[in-house]
């Protein structure tokens, strides 16, 4: 009896010791701060795989010099570094050459092919953020190695399923070509608000920057990404091998300038958390809700509350963080959805921090109160 009691107490102590301080250093099983930023957590069988941007020290770490890192865990606390899941290439001619921008990797297991598919935001070459592409990679095993397949701008030659009539046709195309010829800032501006942006991009495909993936109960996958100069989110339906697009897509949060999409489903509602567009600097989170993933989506408020004691920042700047993923409930999450945020450190990118918090559900609403520990 005593022995059982001791074992239970020891297990409880181990669990308590394993709690992560939100916004603090999160050591992996080797004692090194976890290096997997802007990513996602995939549950596969009884194991969790945490993928994310592998950053190096200093400002150079804002570009990809290594690739996408992966960690595994059975309990979401003890994380083993499995190394690099998708490596950037030493060949300067590669689309994913060292020094490119490779952000927000998301991984799903495809039920049809049994393969693991990774989508990420890719800016090829050494330029800024104007390339606005998605990169797609695939692997036979969750830890990789992922093989890069291609980079593209999605859904060329197609119109959104929910486009209003006045955005279709030749007149709309001419307006769009004129509007996109002018500079449109990556943030709310008068020119940006008036501009009709998507029709002109049917020629080369739509912009693709911050992103996530979502797997529906029926096995259909959706790629949700900031588009149209970051002014509007697109929800793109994927083919059943998850390697391409069906050409059916929907616009949401139109001209709301939303980045950092993270999505979940609960009790007949879809919820999407996002941020505004202020680069690495934090801003106020917002969420949207819908009865169908394809919309219509309704803008709700800021789900965040409470203060992060490590930096004194509250909900107006999302505790200094920016959303990146929502993990579905399981035993290890205590039956809760877990919303995940990055606290970026662009001057020393490798030192970026994590905040994981349970989502509280109301009647068609969500809230995310701060907690010091995950
Ligand atoms: C953020 C975005 C990040 C990264 C950064 C670059 O707004 O969410 O993923 O692209 O801008 O400034």
Image (tube, rainbow, N blue to C red):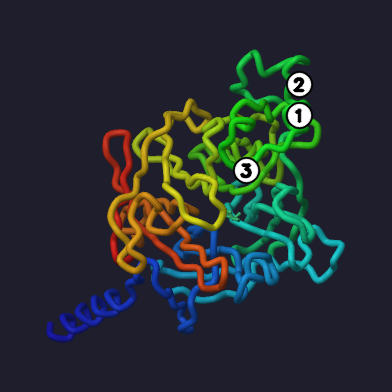
In primary-sequence order, the first of circles 2 and 1 is: 2
**Residue 149 rendering spot, x and y as whole percentages:** 76, 54
> Callout 3: few (<14), some (14-19), or many (20+) C-alpha neighbours within 10 Å?
some
Q: Which mark is residue 200?
A: 1
What's the distance in space between the residues labelled 2 and 3, CA to CA? Answer: 21 Å
- Pick the residue in front: 251 or 294: 251
**Residue 142 rendering spot, x and y as whole percentages:** 59, 63
- Pick the residue in front: 46 or 235: 235
Please say whether residue 221 is visible from this viewpoint: no
In primary-sequence order, the first of circles 2 and 3 is: 2
The C terminus sits in image quarter: bottom left
Disc 1 secondary structure class: helix
> Callout 2: few (<14), some (14-19), or many (20+) C-alpha neighbours within 10 Å?
some
> Callout 1: few (<14), some (14-19), or many (20+) C-alpha neighbours within 10 Å?
many
The N terminus sits in image quarter: bottom left
Q: Which residue is mark 3?
A: 186
**Residue 7 rendering spot, x and y as whole percentages:** 22, 82
**Total marks placed:** 3
Q: Is residue 244 left or right of residue 353?
A: right
């Amino acid at each position: 009896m005593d022995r059982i009691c001791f074992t239970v107490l020891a297990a409880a102590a181990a669990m308590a010791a394993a709690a992560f301080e939100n916004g603090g250093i999160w050591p992996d099983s080797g004692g090194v701060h976890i290096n997997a930023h802007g990513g996602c957590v995939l549950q596969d069988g009884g194991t969790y795989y945490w993928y994310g941007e592998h950053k190096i020290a200093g400002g150079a770490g804002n570009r990809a010099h290594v690739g996408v890192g992966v960690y595994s865990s059975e309990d979401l606390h003890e994380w083993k570094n499995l190394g690099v899941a998708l490596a950037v290439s030493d060949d300067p001619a590669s689309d994913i050459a060292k020094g490119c921008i490779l952000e927000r990797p998301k991984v799903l297991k495809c039920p049809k092919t049994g393969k693991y598919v990774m989508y990420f935001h890719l800016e090829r070459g050494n330029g800024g953020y104007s390339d606005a592409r998605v990169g797609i990679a695939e692997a036979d095993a969750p830890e990789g190695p992922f093989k890069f397949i291609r980079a593209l701008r999605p859904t060329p030659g197609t119109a959104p399923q929910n486009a209003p009539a006045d955005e279709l046709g030749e007149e709309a195309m001419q307006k769009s070509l004129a509007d996109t010829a002018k500079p449109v800032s990556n943030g709310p501006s008068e020119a940006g608000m008036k501009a009709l942006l998507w029709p002109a991009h049917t020629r080369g495909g739509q912009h693709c920057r911050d992103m996530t993936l979502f797997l529906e109960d029926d096995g259909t996958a959706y790629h949700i990404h900031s588009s149209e100069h970051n002014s509007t989110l697109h929800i793109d339906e994927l083919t059943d091998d998850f390697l391409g697009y069906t050409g059916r897509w929907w616009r949401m949060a139109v001209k709301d300038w939303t980045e950092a999409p993270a999505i979940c489903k609960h009790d007949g509602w879809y919820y999407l958390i996002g941020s505004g567009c202020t680069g690495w600097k934090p801003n106020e989170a917002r969420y949207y809700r819908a009865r169908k993933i394809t919309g219509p989506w309704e803008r709700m408020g800021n789900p965040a509350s409470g203060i992060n004691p490590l930096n004194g920042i509250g909900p107006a700047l999302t505790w200094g963080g920016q959303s990146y993923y929502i993990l579905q409930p399981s035993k290890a999450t205590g039956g809760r959805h877990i919303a995940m945020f990055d606290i970026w450190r662009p001057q020393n990118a490798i030192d970026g921090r994590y905040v994981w918090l349970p989502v509280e559900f109301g009647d068609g609403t969500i809230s995310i109160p701060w907690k010091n520990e995950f």
